[in-house]
Amino acid sequence: MYLFTSFILFNRPKQWFRCTFHWICTVTNQKPFRILLVDDEPGIRKILRLFLELEGFSVFEAITANQAISVIKKEKPHLVILDVILCGQTGFDVCEWVKGSPETKDIIVFLFTALNQEHDYREGQRVGCDLYLTKPQNPKDIVEKVNEYLNIRPGSKSNPG
């Protein structure tokens, strides 16, 4: 554990103020959980990335199914938030590939889509998704679900166990 002290000096007319801040930091070799966001909408990726990074997650992004598969092979994320409607293959295809491969079958997959018909939900179950979320969703609720599925207690650090 390390203690850092920071000083900030600022002035107001005819007065100087000195504020002291103490920071206690711990060093750990554990890396944060890795999350992959797969969506062709940049606004959705941006807001989810912001909320997830504020929680301490390491976030990767992909726009297409092929990019998603490449990132999954390289980065081995703990959890994937996956849109269904993608360029080329669908999110259903990616999920089925993830859950069908011995190297990736334990990755948690959330399907996050505007498709909200019963047959879409059943297809999500068939391909093995862990959670089927329909758009729109509050980003805070998604982060809560991510924490729940990764078994992270509120207030604890997002480190893999």
Image (cartoon, rainbow, N blue to C red):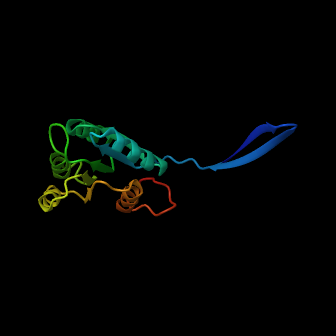
Q: What count of labels does the image hold?
A: 0
Q: Residue at x 52, y 61 (%)?
A: 155
In front: 160, or 123?
123
Q: Residue furthest front?
A: 13
Q: Residue at x 26, y 48 (%)?
A: 82
29 w.r.t. 148: above or below: above
117 w.r.t. 79: above or below: below
- Residue 49, x across and y down, in percent: 40, 44
Q: Residue furthest right?
A: 14
In front: 93, or 49?
49
Looking at the image, residue 138 sits to the left or right of residue 69; the answer is right
In front: 156, or 84?
84
Q: Quadrant of residue 118?
A: bottom left
Q: Residue at x 21, y 57 (%)?
A: 129
In front: 125, or 160?
125
97 w.r.t. 152: above or below: above
- Residue 66, x across and y down, in percent: 20, 36
- Residue 71, x across and y down, in percent: 29, 38
Q: In the rendered image, which quarter contains the C terminus?
A: bottom left
Looking at the image, residue 5 sits to the left or right of residue 98; the answer is right
Looking at the image, residue 125 sits to the left or right of residue 154; the answer is left
Looking at the image, residue 55 sits to the left or right of residue 7; the answer is left
Res 88 visible: yes
Res 1 visible: no
